[in-house]
Image (spheres, rainbow, N blue to C red):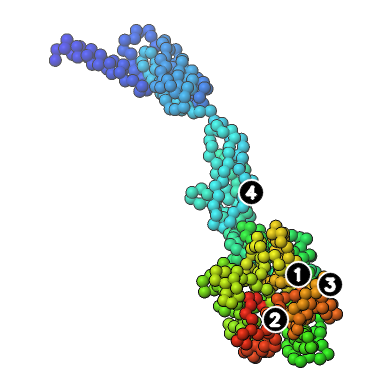
Amino acid sequence: MNKDLGIKIAFILVGLFSVYLLISGFSSSETTNTSNSSDEILEEQLTVNPTSLSMIVGDTSTITATILPVDTTNKNLYWETANSNIATVDEGKVTAINPGKTVIKVTTEKRKITRIINVTVSNKEIPITEIITELHHIDLEVGDTKKIEYEIYPSDATNKKVSFITGDKNIAAFNKEGLLVGVSEGETTITLKSSNDVTATVNIKVKNKDIPVSKVTLNKKKLTLEIGKTETLTHKVIPTNATNTNVTWTSSNNSVATVSNGKVTAKKAGTSTITVKTDDGEKTATCKVTVNNPKPPTQKPIVPSSYIDKYESNTLKYYLVKTEGYYLTYIWMEDPYNQIRKLEAHTAAYGKVLKDSEITGNYQHLRMNVGDMMQNYINYGIIPVNKGAVGYNGSGFYASGSWDPPAKYYDYHSNSWLSLMDGIVLRYYPNDGLTQSDIIGIAENGDLKVYEMTSDSSKREAIYNEIKKDKVKNTWSFLPYLVKDGKVYDDSMINSHMRQAICQVNTNNYIMLTTIYSYNYNQMSNLFVSLGCKTAHNLDGGGSTSMYMKKAGERTPTKVKCSENSGNRCRAIIEGIYFVEK
């Protein structure tokens, strides 16, 4: 190789190396400038402090760059940022703009020595100052879950993370969904804690799971008491292992009956509803309480000095007296309210009680004498064979046509706008034109009650309400009223006829009068007063007058008196009255 060619190659190599130094970018480097003059001192080293920065948005920081040797002729530096959206640089002063990471490059002018400074910019940290929980106390049942609701303050805290610390995981713990779970019965605490150690505490109480009440019952749905009497109702909560079995007792009418822990005390006559209500679920059960006036003491039987027949049992006694003009039956009953009953032709014929609305077709036009009605009652078991009984004619009756043959288009019935049998309303026609009869009935206290006739249909509802208030179950109807409050009701009634009448002496003693010959009402009234009757009333008589008796074990009643018509038959009627052994 000749000398000129070698020099040329050397210059080419130097030029290429210079280009390489210019295009080296952000790489830290130390470059030798071969073009410096012989008196210029070039930089040999570049150091920076700090070598990395962590900054908060808005803050500034200065990077110190040092060139060595200290007597370097050209100390000019070039500063650059890789991302001015994150941080800017001006002569080494760095300003944090937005969160993120970038680099700052500083380069010497001559030899292009470069240093890189890593910069991390973060938002300004806002610490949590308070944790507020929705609840300070939480009740849980075993197995139930609860989300712990809370708020942190300030709401723009930088680190919002809150951890949960359980005081006793055997009582309450958090599941993988972050919900608090009741583990076992007991008490513990839950602590909420922030990264900067701000805390809040929630008290936790866990109890065994409640078993709810589904129903409550009472041992009685109805209760009857006399004033001053008490009875304790018992209740049952279902299921019996319900968690809360507490109940509350109330009375709908404390003036009638009060209640305390199920003990009912009767205060005055009337009705009240006793209610038991569970605390859990408010389930209820009720008992209707009826309070009655005290029953008068049982009166001894009135036994006449002489009699032609008698029947005596524990609940029914009767003594038959016969004089020249009449029969008297002294009747003692343990319970007149339930032992004075109605004979009724349709019931006797078909063995069941029929209302007026049911008396159609084959049920129409029925009449039957007292003996046949009693016989059929025995056959149907209405009057038991093993019980004694005595029966008589009762109400007057009505038909739209002649008696024989029966009316063609209208059934026979009691001649009153109201007829009751065993508590069933056979007929109730308050606007009926039939006004000629009083209504007679036996009240719950055993008294013979008379509800006087009225032609004013507007007053009949009030009479019916009074009958219902007295709890009358059976009624009869006829005229006239004979004795009221122990005195003759009307001494001007002198019409004579063969008669049947009923009288009450006291609670348990009644007398039935069955005349053999004609008697006028005044004679009958005075006779009843002389016998000590407090109330007496006439029943249907004339050709309907009848009396039959039956003793326990007898299957057929014995005729004592009746008015026989053609064919030697007693007159057929609609309603009678009988007294029966309990």
SS of the residue under disc 4: strand
Please provide percent x and percent y for residue 422. Answer: 65, 73
Query: Of tags 4 and 3, which is closer to the observer?
Result: 3
Task: Identify whether 212 is placed above or below 386.
Answer: above
97 relative to 498, above or below: above
Amino acid at dot 2 = Thr
Q: Which of marks 4 and 1 is nearer the N terminus?
A: 4
Please tell me whether mark 2 or mark 1 is closer to you in this view: 2
Position of the C terminus by quadrant: bottom right
Q: In this view, does 568 lie above or below 409?
A: below
**Residue depicted at 58% across the width and 41% down the height:** 150
The answer to whether the residues at label 4 and label 1 have Cβ atoms under 8 Å apart is no
Q: Earlier in the sequence, mark 2 or mark 3?
A: 3
Spot occupied by residue 63 in the image (x, y as percentages of width and height): 48, 20
What residue is shown with label 4? Answer: 137
Residue at image mark 1: 450
Frontmost of labels 2 and 4 is 2
- The mark that comes first in sequence, 2 or 4, is 4
Three-letter amino acid code at disc 4?
Answer: His
Q: Residue at x 71, y 59 (%)?
A: 456
Q: Label 1 sits on what residue type?
A: Val
Q: Is residue 30 left or right of residue 164?
A: left
Where disc 3 sits, the SS reads loop
> Which of labels 3 and 1 is toward the front?
3
Residue 491's label in the rendered image is 3
Amino acid type for the residue under numbered disc 3: Asp
Residues at discs 3 and 1 in contact (Cβ within 8 Å) = no
Q: Which residue has dot 2 on it? A: 545
| Callout 2: SS | loop
- CA distance for labels 2 and 1: 21 Å
Using the numbered discs, state the Cα–Cα distance from disc 4 to disc 3 in whole angstroms. Answer: 89 Å
